[in-house]
Structure formats: structure tokens, C-alpha cells
Amino acid sequence: QVQLVESGGGSVQAGGSLRLSCAASGYTYSPNCMAWFRQAPGKEREGVAAIYTRKGYTYYSDSVKGRFTISRDYAKNTVYLQMNSLKPEDTAMYYCAAGAGVMSWSSPGHFSDWGQGTQVTVSS
């Protein structure tokens, strides 16, 4: 049974940092892409960052580029999202996602597996 378990969310002041973790287990195939999405109340789920596992290519949304870094520890089957210089507009539920054959990393529909989410709240 595939499981993605996120951790590391919390409340911070603007300018602070958090590191999210996503531990993957139960895979019988190797996802070609793992990503972080976020969803704020009343808004659509948006792609934040992604890593293509074979070559390690990374992608970011314009809103987080230069502040967030996605990385993967292959030995631990864990993906991380280091978030620096956090802003109040980064406040959202953050979800880890994985999929095979993902062509468009920022499209939620391309991902088959999702974690339960971890809340990030940034106060001004």
C-alpha cells in the first residue's frame, strides 16, 4: 500500500524558515516525479515545486522561486521542501504528491498518490 506521509509544518513569523518532509513507502514502481502542492482556503491547489527522480531536474512556481528548495534523499525515500523567507501568502495546507509518467508537474491531475497534508501558517 502506497503511503506518503508529510511532516514539518507549523507556525512561523514572516521571514522564517520551515522544512517539510515527505516519506514514501509501499511503492512497487518508481515514481518519475514527486512534488509539493499547496492549497489555501477558497483557492485551488497549486504546484509549488517538483523533482523528476531520474535526472533530478527541479521546477518551481514563480511565487516561491529563490526561496524554496526541493530535494530528495533516495536512501530514505524522502522528499524535502526547504522553505526560507516565508511570507504570509505562503500560508496553506501543503501536500506531497507522486506519480509515474508525469508530464506536467504543476497539474494535480497528473499525480496518482497524495499525502494527507501538513499545515503551514506564516504570520506577519
Image: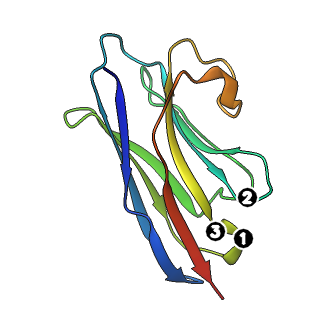
- Residue 83's spot in the image, x, y percent? 50, 64
- Label 3 sits on a secondary structure element that is loop
Pick whichever, 89 or 63, lies toward us: 89
- Kindly indicate whether the residue at mark 2 contacts the one at mark 1 (C-beta within 8 angstroms): yes
SS class, disc 2: loop
Look at discs 1 and 2 and give the one toward the viewer: 1
Tell whether 85 sits left or right of 64. Answer: left
Q: Which mark is drawn over residue 63?
A: 2
**Nearest to N terminus: mark 1 or mark 2:** 2
Q: Is 86 situated left or right of 5 in this image?
A: right
Q: Which residue is mark 1?
A: 89
Q: How busy is the neighbourhood of tag 2: few (under 14 within 10 Å), some, or many (20 plus)?
A: few
Residue type at the position of mark 2: Ser
**Any mark on residue 54, and which?**
none
Q: Residues within 10 Å of mark 1 (few under 14, many from 20)?
A: few
Badge 3: how crowded within 10 Å, few (<14), some, or many (20+)?
A: many
Q: Gap between marks 1 and 3, in whole Å?
A: 5 Å
Q: Which mark is residue 91?
A: 3
Residue at the (31%, 18%) spot, across then down: 27
| Residue 82 quadrant | bottom left
Are the residues at dot 1 and dot 3 in contact (C-beta closer than 8 Å)? yes
Residue at image location 26% in from the left, 32% down from the top: 74
Ranked by sequence position, the earlier of labels 3 and 2 is 2
Q: CA distance from mark 1 to mark 2?
A: 9 Å
Question: Which amino acid, by three-letter code, is at mark 3?
Answer: Thr
